[in-house]
Each structure stands twice: as structure tokens, then as C-alpha cells.
């Protein structure tokens, strides 16, 4: 499965949705409202950044105007998924482009840095992909996704209560806040429930040594919890093959999307793996979800990635928040409205955002089969 260039995607969508804009011409106010988009448009993470942007563009093509007739314009900034570039992008969007709100598709590590200065800019920011709970420790960054306290807890309880496995190995990348927090949450909850954990730690750029894996195998461990990058999981798979060991593996959100977009030639590695995620294949979609699915399958003839769906949902939720404000450029009103989102109809379920900025939505445990997130358990 190969990534489709964004230029081609944009051309297809522009042609497809010309009628959407013409239907609203009689309501046009003549005013343009800007929403900023920050995400990796270049660098090692550009494929999932561009897939997230694709979702935003699909949502805007479906609803190019607010209810008051204001046209919505997306202003795109590339942060290469780094804090330095993200901070510059946010400053430009707020001070130069005068955006009313910002969508950010970067990971937890980058968004945590941005969040430290969010209150200075007093502009609503919706984190589409960052699951670390601390990104909302301010007044202006809200999350579209469940946070890692929920994700780690659900994963741990499923393993010990449903799979009846009481001894696991947990891998933790000390250089990544996302990996550290998820691993620690899983460990704490698993041990509270009576389980035993053997932890494997490594620093930035580190790899799993075959000796460590042999030690786990010799302890009789048959389950690995791996809140890691696709590249790190590839390395673990390579090493386990060398020692003829085939443990059951559980990964965290977005992993299949990473493999589809960045390592499509290695999709066999994740076949049969368990993974927590925001979506699951085969469940009944909402009316909103059916529209998105029809558009995507018609143009690309495949299942959308998690990143694309997050882009669609996040943009639609931000537009809905703007529609609830009399002045669609009033950042304070949009921020309050965003944090009062209640039962928004997402792709396969409802999404709410609390006054704290944290999202309430279902979390799924899936098994990856035939390049799809096949539903196992839903927790809400």
C-alpha cells in the first residue's frame, strides 16, 4: 500500500466537492475565517502529517462555510514534528495570519512543548494526535483523542482480566514522554491488579539487544506491551525471529497507520498484533462516518488511516465550535465552545470535550488482521 501524493488528493477532492461550495453561495458573508494547521509536512513523519491534513481538507470540502456564511480557510505550517518548528509556526499563525483557532497534528512530545506557551497566545488549539494527559495542563490546548492514562489502564486490565496473562514484559523508550507515560501507567495498573512486570528500557536511538529478548523468553514470558514507534517494533520483530520466539504483542494507538504509511513493505510484522486505537474496522458507522467512508473509498479504494479520520473529526468539531459563537473570530468564545463539545457525532461514535480540554470517547482494543484494525473490545 503506497502513500498517495497530497497534490493528487487535493485535486481529486477539489473536483469532487465543487457542488458543496455552490450550494452555500447565497449565504456567503464575504468574510474569511482562518484555521491554522500545524503538522509534519516534511521529515520522517511527513506521511502521517499529510494524511492528517487530508482529513482536514475533506472536512472543509464538506463544509467550506460556517453557518453565518463566513468562508473557512486553512493556513498550513510545517513543523517537521519538532518543538522548534512548532513554536515558530504557532507564533506566525497567531500573530501574522491572525487565525481564529489551530489544529495540531504533531505527537505528544512536540505538543507538550507547545502547550507550555499556549496561555500566552490565548488561541484555541485542538491536539489531534497527542495523547499525553499533560498537554491539557493549560487553558487553551484541548485533545481530540483519549489520553494515555485511559489507554494504559484499559490495555493493562484487558491483558490481566480478559487474556488471563499475569506476567508480561513492558518496553519503555526513556527519550519519549509518550512511551514513558504509557509504559508506567500500564505497569502501575497491571501490578495493582496482581500481575508481574519485567521492564525493558532503552534510551534515544537505542535498540533492543537480543540478549534482553532471550532473557524474557527464558523467563517464560509470552506477552509484550510495546508503546513504541514502528521502527522500534520492527527492530524487536527482527530480533525475536533470530531466536525463534513468537510472543503475543500489544501496541498503542496509531501503529497500523504508521506501518501503512511508512513501512508498507513490512506489514506482515503487525499481522495478528493487538493494538489500542480510536477506531475499529467492521463496526457500524454514524451518518457522519458513512459520508466520510463513501468519499474516501470512492477516491482511494482503501480504508482511511487513523490520522486521516482524526483530521476529519478535529476539523468538523472546530467548525461546530465556531458555529456556536456569534463572532466566529472570537478566540475566547471558540475556546469555551470547544471545551463544551457534547456528544459530537464522530466516525463511529460520540465525542465530548470537557471543560478541562480532555476528550471523552471510546477506546478500542483491536487485532490487526489483513491490514485492518479488527474489533475485539470497546471501552467507553
Image (cartoon, grey):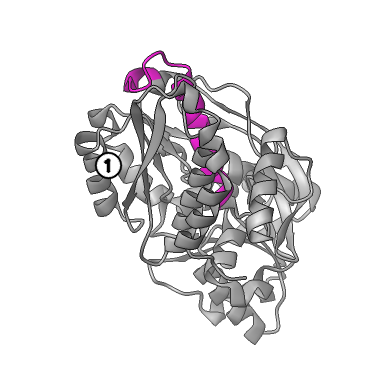
Q: Is residue 164 left or right of residue 89?
A: right
Pick out the residue farthest to the top: 326
Residue 86 image offset from top left, x and y in percent: 29, 49
Give coordinates of residue 352: x percent, y percent: 58, 26
Frontmost residue, 329 versus 241: 329
Q: Specify whether 337 is left or right of 306.
A: left
Q: Nearer the viewer, residue 273 or 15?
A: 15
Percent position of residue 137, x then y: 38, 31
Question: Which residue is label 1 attached to?
Answer: 90
Location of the N terminus by quadrant is bottom right
Where is residue 101? Give x, y as percent: 36, 32
The magenta region covers 307-333
Can residue 338 be seen here? no
- Please say whether residue 32 is one of the residues in the magenta stretch: no
Q: Kindly give the residue lying farthest to the bottom in the view shown.
A: 242
The image quadrant of residue 116 is top left
Magenta segment's dominant SS is helix
Identify whether 136 is placed above or below 107.
Answer: above
- What residue lies at 62% left-to-right and 33% top-to-bottom? 361
Amino acid at each position: 500500500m503506497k502513500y498517495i501524493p497530497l497534490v493528487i488528493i487535493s485535486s481529486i477532492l477539489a473536483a469532487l466537492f465543487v457542488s458543496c461550495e455552490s450550494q452555500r453561495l447565497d449565504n456567503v458573508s464575504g468574510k474569511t475565517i482562518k484555521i491554522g494547521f500545524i503538522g509534519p509536512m516534511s521529515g520522517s513523519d511527513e506521511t502521517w502529517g499529510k494524511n492528517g491534513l487530508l482529513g482536514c481538507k475533506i472536512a472543509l470540502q464538506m463544509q467550506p462555510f460556517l453557518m453565518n456564511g463566513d468562508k473557512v480557510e486553512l493556513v498550513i505550517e510545517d513543523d517537521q514534528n519538532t518543538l522548534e518548528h512548532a513554536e515558530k509556526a504557532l507564533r506566525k499563525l497567531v500573530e501574522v495570519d491572525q487565525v481564529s483557532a489551530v489544529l495540531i497534528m504533531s505527537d505528544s512530545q512536540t505538543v507538550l512543548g507547545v502547550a507550555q506557551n499556549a496561555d500566552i497566545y490565548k488561541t484555541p488549539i485542538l491536539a489531534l494526535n497527542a495523547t499525553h494527559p499533560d498537554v491539557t495542563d493549560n487553558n487553551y490546548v484541548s485533545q481530540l483523542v483519549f489520553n494515555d492514562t485511559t489507554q494504559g489502564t484499559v490495555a493493562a486490565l484487558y491483558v490481566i482480566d480478559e487474556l488471563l496473562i499475569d506476567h508480561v514484559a513492558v518496553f519503555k523508550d526513556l527519550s519519549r514522554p509518550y512511551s514513558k507515560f504509557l509504559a508506567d501507567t500500564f505497569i502501575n495498573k497491571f501490578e495493582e491488579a496482581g500481575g508481574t512486570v519485567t521492564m525493558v528500557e532503552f534510551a534515544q536511538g537505542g535498540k533492543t539487544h537480543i540478549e534482553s529478548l532471550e532473557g524474557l523468553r527464558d523467563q517464560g514470558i509470552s506477552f509484550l506491551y510495546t508503546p513504541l514507534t514502528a521502527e522500534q517494533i520492527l527492530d524487536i520483530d527482527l530480533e525475536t525471529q533470530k531466536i525463534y520466539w513468537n510472543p503475543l504483542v500489544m501496541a498503542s494507538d496509531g501503529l497500523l497507520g504508521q506501518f501503512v504509511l511508512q513501512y508498507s513493505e513490512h506489514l506482515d510484522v503487525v499481522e495478528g498484533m493487538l493494538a489500542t486505537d480510536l477506531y475499529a474496522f467492521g463496526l457500524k458507522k454514524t451518518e457522519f462516518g458513512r459520508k466520510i467512508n463513501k468519499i474516501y473509498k470512492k477516491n482511494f479504494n482503501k480504508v482511511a488511516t487513523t490520522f486521516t479520520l482524526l483530521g476529519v473529526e478535529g476539523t468538523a468539531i472546530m467548525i461546530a465550535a465556531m458555529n456556536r459563537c456569534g463572532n466566529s473570530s472570537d478566540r475566547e468564545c471558540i475556546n469555551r465552545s470547544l471545551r463544551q463539545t457534547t456528544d459530537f457525532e464522530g466516525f463511529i461514535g460520540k465525542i465530548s470535550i470537557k471543560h478541562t480540554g480532555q476528550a471523552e470517547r471510546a477506546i478500542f482494543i483491536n487485532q490487526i488482521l489483513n491490514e485492518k484494525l479488527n474489533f475485539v473490545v470497546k471501552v467507553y
